[in-house]
Image (cartoon, rainbow, N blue to C red):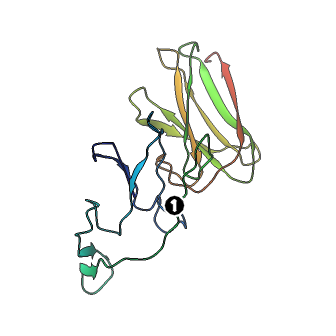
Protein backbone atom coordinates (compact mmCIF):
# COMPACT_ATOMS: atom_id res chain seq x y z
CA UNK A 1 0.00 0.00 0.00
CA UNK A 2 1.28 3.45 -0.87
CA UNK A 3 0.15 7.00 -0.13
CA UNK A 4 0.67 9.62 -2.85
CA UNK A 5 0.42 13.40 -3.08
CA UNK A 6 -1.86 15.25 -5.52
CA UNK A 7 0.86 15.04 -8.20
CA UNK A 8 1.27 11.27 -7.92
CA UNK A 9 4.53 11.34 -5.96
CA UNK A 10 4.98 8.53 -3.44
CA UNK A 11 4.90 9.94 0.12
CA UNK A 12 4.91 6.77 2.19
CA UNK A 13 4.45 3.04 1.81
CA UNK A 14 4.21 -0.11 3.89
CA UNK A 15 4.45 -3.65 2.64
CA UNK A 16 3.32 -5.45 5.81
CA UNK A 17 4.04 -3.47 9.00
CA UNK A 18 5.94 -6.39 10.51
CA UNK A 19 5.85 -9.53 8.37
CA UNK A 20 3.93 -12.46 9.82
CA UNK A 21 2.54 -10.48 12.76
CA UNK A 22 -1.01 -10.86 11.47
CA UNK A 23 -1.32 -7.18 10.62
CA UNK A 24 -1.82 -5.80 7.15
CA UNK A 25 0.03 -2.77 5.79
CA UNK A 26 -0.64 0.39 7.76
CA UNK A 27 0.17 3.97 6.87
CA UNK A 28 -0.15 6.77 9.37
CA UNK A 29 -0.19 10.43 8.56
CA UNK A 30 -2.04 13.67 8.42
CA UNK A 31 -4.97 14.13 6.06
CA UNK A 32 -4.17 16.93 3.58
CA UNK A 33 -6.04 20.22 3.87
CA UNK A 34 -8.06 19.36 0.75
CA UNK A 35 -9.30 16.20 2.49
CA UNK A 36 -8.17 13.84 -0.29
CA UNK A 37 -6.13 10.70 0.33
CA UNK A 38 -4.47 9.11 -2.71
CA UNK A 39 -3.78 5.43 -1.97
CA UNK A 40 -2.64 2.59 -4.22
CA UNK A 41 -2.68 -1.06 -3.30
CA UNK A 42 -0.71 -3.68 -5.20
CA UNK A 43 0.90 -7.07 -4.71
CA UNK A 44 4.27 -7.87 -3.25
CA UNK A 45 7.17 -6.79 -5.41
CA UNK A 46 5.27 -4.05 -7.26
CA UNK A 47 7.33 -1.27 -5.69
CA UNK A 48 6.39 1.18 -8.46
CA UNK A 49 2.65 0.58 -7.96
CA UNK A 50 2.24 0.25 -11.72
CA UNK A 51 0.99 -3.35 -11.86
CA UNK A 52 3.71 -4.28 -14.34
CA UNK A 53 5.85 -6.38 -12.03
CA UNK A 54 5.38 -9.93 -13.30
CA UNK A 55 7.61 -11.70 -10.78
CA UNK A 56 9.14 -11.05 -7.42
CA UNK A 57 12.24 -12.66 -5.96
CA UNK A 58 12.21 -14.69 -2.81
CA UNK A 59 15.48 -15.43 -1.07
CA UNK A 60 15.63 -18.29 1.39
CA UNK A 61 18.87 -19.00 3.25
CA UNK A 62 18.16 -22.67 3.96
CA UNK A 63 16.48 -23.52 0.64
CA UNK A 64 18.37 -25.75 -1.82
CA UNK A 65 17.83 -23.37 -4.75
CA UNK A 66 17.74 -19.61 -4.27
CA UNK A 67 16.56 -17.14 -5.29
CA UNK A 68 13.21 -18.28 -6.57
CA UNK A 69 10.94 -16.23 -8.77
CA UNK A 70 7.24 -16.19 -8.04
CA UNK A 71 4.53 -14.86 -10.35
CA UNK A 72 2.84 -11.60 -9.43
CA UNK A 73 -0.76 -12.57 -10.17
CA UNK A 74 -2.36 -11.35 -6.99
CA UNK A 75 -5.98 -10.46 -7.44
CA UNK A 76 -8.91 -10.46 -5.14
CA UNK A 77 -10.95 -8.50 -2.72
CA UNK A 78 -9.47 -6.56 0.14
CA UNK A 79 -10.78 -4.33 2.87
CA UNK A 80 -9.43 -0.81 3.22
CA UNK A 81 -10.01 0.84 6.57
CA UNK A 82 -9.23 4.51 7.10
CA UNK A 83 -9.17 5.65 10.71
CA UNK A 84 -9.50 9.38 11.25
CA UNK A 85 -8.61 10.99 14.55
CA UNK A 86 -6.30 9.95 17.34
CA UNK A 87 -6.36 6.21 16.90
CA UNK A 88 -4.22 3.85 18.95
CA UNK A 89 -2.74 1.52 16.40
CA UNK A 90 -0.35 -1.34 16.97
CA UNK A 91 3.17 -0.25 16.11
CA UNK A 92 2.82 3.16 17.73
CA UNK A 93 5.84 4.72 19.41
CA UNK A 94 5.77 7.73 21.73
CA UNK A 95 8.54 10.33 22.09
CA UNK A 96 9.17 12.49 25.16
CA UNK A 97 11.75 15.14 26.03
CA UNK A 98 12.39 15.85 29.70
CA UNK A 99 13.88 19.34 29.89
CA UNK A 100 15.05 21.68 32.63
CA UNK A 101 16.94 18.90 34.42
CA UNK A 102 20.20 19.57 36.26
CA UNK A 103 23.18 18.42 34.18
CA UNK A 104 25.11 15.67 35.93
CA UNK A 105 22.16 14.49 38.04
CA UNK A 106 21.08 10.86 37.91
CA UNK A 107 17.68 10.26 36.33
CA UNK A 108 15.52 7.14 36.51
CA UNK A 109 12.44 6.52 34.39
CA UNK A 110 10.28 3.58 35.47
CA UNK A 111 7.12 1.97 34.20
CA UNK A 112 4.60 2.55 37.00
CA UNK A 113 1.59 0.88 35.46
CA UNK A 114 0.96 -1.06 32.32
CA UNK A 115 -2.17 -2.59 30.94
CA UNK A 116 -1.91 -6.07 29.43
CA UNK A 117 1.28 -5.41 27.46
CA UNK A 118 4.93 -4.75 28.18
CA UNK A 119 6.75 -1.61 27.10
CA UNK A 120 10.30 -0.85 26.01
CA UNK A 121 11.87 2.49 27.02
CA UNK A 122 14.74 3.94 25.03
CA UNK A 123 17.04 6.87 25.85
CA UNK A 124 17.93 8.80 22.70
CA UNK A 125 20.72 11.27 21.94
CA UNK A 126 19.69 14.61 20.41
CA UNK A 127 20.51 13.19 16.97
CA UNK A 128 18.09 10.28 17.53
CA UNK A 129 20.65 7.53 18.09
CA UNK A 130 19.92 5.07 20.88
CA UNK A 131 22.01 5.56 24.02
CA UNK A 132 20.39 2.82 26.10
CA UNK A 133 17.38 0.51 26.29
CA UNK A 134 15.37 -0.27 29.39
CA UNK A 135 15.56 -3.56 31.19
CA UNK A 136 13.35 -5.28 33.69
CA UNK A 137 13.93 -3.77 37.09
CA UNK A 138 13.23 -5.27 40.47
CA UNK A 139 9.98 -3.28 40.42
CA UNK A 140 7.80 -6.36 39.89
CA UNK A 141 9.14 -6.92 36.39
CA UNK A 142 8.45 -3.43 35.06
CA UNK A 143 10.77 -1.60 32.70
CA UNK A 144 13.30 0.94 33.97
CA UNK A 145 16.08 3.05 32.48
CA UNK A 146 18.60 5.27 34.26
CA UNK A 147 21.48 7.54 33.33
CA UNK A 148 23.28 10.83 33.88
CA UNK A 149 21.54 14.01 32.66
CA UNK A 150 23.56 15.41 29.71
CA UNK A 151 25.08 18.95 29.73
CA UNK A 152 22.05 20.42 27.90
CA UNK A 153 19.75 19.37 30.78
CA UNK A 154 17.39 17.30 28.67
CA UNK A 155 16.69 13.59 28.26
CA UNK A 156 14.99 12.27 25.11
CA UNK A 157 12.91 9.12 25.57
CA UNK A 158 10.96 6.79 23.33
CA UNK A 159 8.36 4.26 24.50
CA UNK A 160 7.43 1.30 22.33
CA UNK A 161 6.18 -2.26 22.73
CA UNK A 162 8.49 -4.67 24.53
CA UNK A 163 9.33 -6.75 21.42
CA UNK A 164 10.49 -3.63 19.55
CA UNK A 165 14.21 -3.93 20.30
CA UNK A 166 15.24 -1.46 17.57
CA UNK A 167 12.56 1.12 18.53
CA UNK A 168 10.99 1.34 15.08
CA UNK A 169 7.40 0.47 15.97
CA UNK A 170 7.71 -3.21 15.16
CA UNK A 171 5.24 -4.54 17.71
CA UNK A 172 1.53 -5.24 18.01
CA UNK A 173 0.95 -3.77 21.48
CA UNK A 174 -1.40 -0.93 22.37
CA UNK A 175 -2.80 0.39 25.61
CA UNK A 176 -2.11 2.73 28.49
CA UNK A 177 1.07 3.06 30.51
CA UNK A 178 2.38 5.46 33.14
CA UNK A 179 6.01 6.50 33.55
CA UNK A 180 7.57 7.78 36.77
CA UNK A 181 10.57 10.11 36.50
CA UNK A 182 12.95 10.61 39.41
CA UNK A 183 16.15 12.66 39.60
CA UNK A 184 18.79 12.91 42.31
CA UNK A 185 22.20 14.49 42.67
CA UNK A 186 25.06 12.27 41.57
CA UNK A 187 27.08 10.80 44.44
Left or right? Give the position of 129 relative to 138: left
Left or right? Give the position of 132 relative to 5: right
Residue drawn at the location 64% of the way across and 29% of the way down = 108
For disc 1, the marked residue is 80
Q: Is residue 106 above or below residue 143?
A: above
Quarter of the rendering occupied by the C terminus: top right
Picture quadrant where residue 62 is located:
bottom left
User: Helix or strand or loop: what does disc 1 sit on?
Assistant: loop
Q: Which is more toward the observer, 31 or 21?
A: 31
Question: x and y percent of residue 183 in the render?
Answer: 66, 20
Q: Residues within 10 Å of mark 1 (few under 14, many from 20)?
A: few
Left or right? Give the position of 70 relative to 169: left
Residue drawn at the location 54% of the way across and 32% of the way down = 157
Q: Is residue 94 above or below residue 10?
A: above
Q: Which is more toward the observer, 118 or 11?
A: 11
Left or right? Give the position of 93 relative to 38: right
Question: x and y percent of residue 5 in the render?
Answer: 33, 43
Picture quadrant where residue 15 is located:
bottom left
Quarter of the rendering occupied by the N terminus: bottom left
Question: x and y percent of residue 115 in the render?
Answer: 75, 49
Residue drawn at the location 22% of the way across and 69% of the way down = 52
Q: Is residue 171 above or below residue 97?
A: below
Q: Is residue 156 above or below residue 175?
A: above
Q: How many marks?
A: 1
Question: x and y percent of residue 74 in the render?
Answer: 36, 77
Residue drawn at the location 68% of the way across and 27% of the way down = 181
Amino acid sequence: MGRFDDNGNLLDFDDDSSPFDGLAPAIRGRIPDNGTLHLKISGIGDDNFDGLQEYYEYYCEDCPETPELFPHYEEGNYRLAVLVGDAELPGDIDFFTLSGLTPGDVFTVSESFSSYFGIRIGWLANNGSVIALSNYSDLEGREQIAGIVPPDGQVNLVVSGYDDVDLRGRHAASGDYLLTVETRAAE
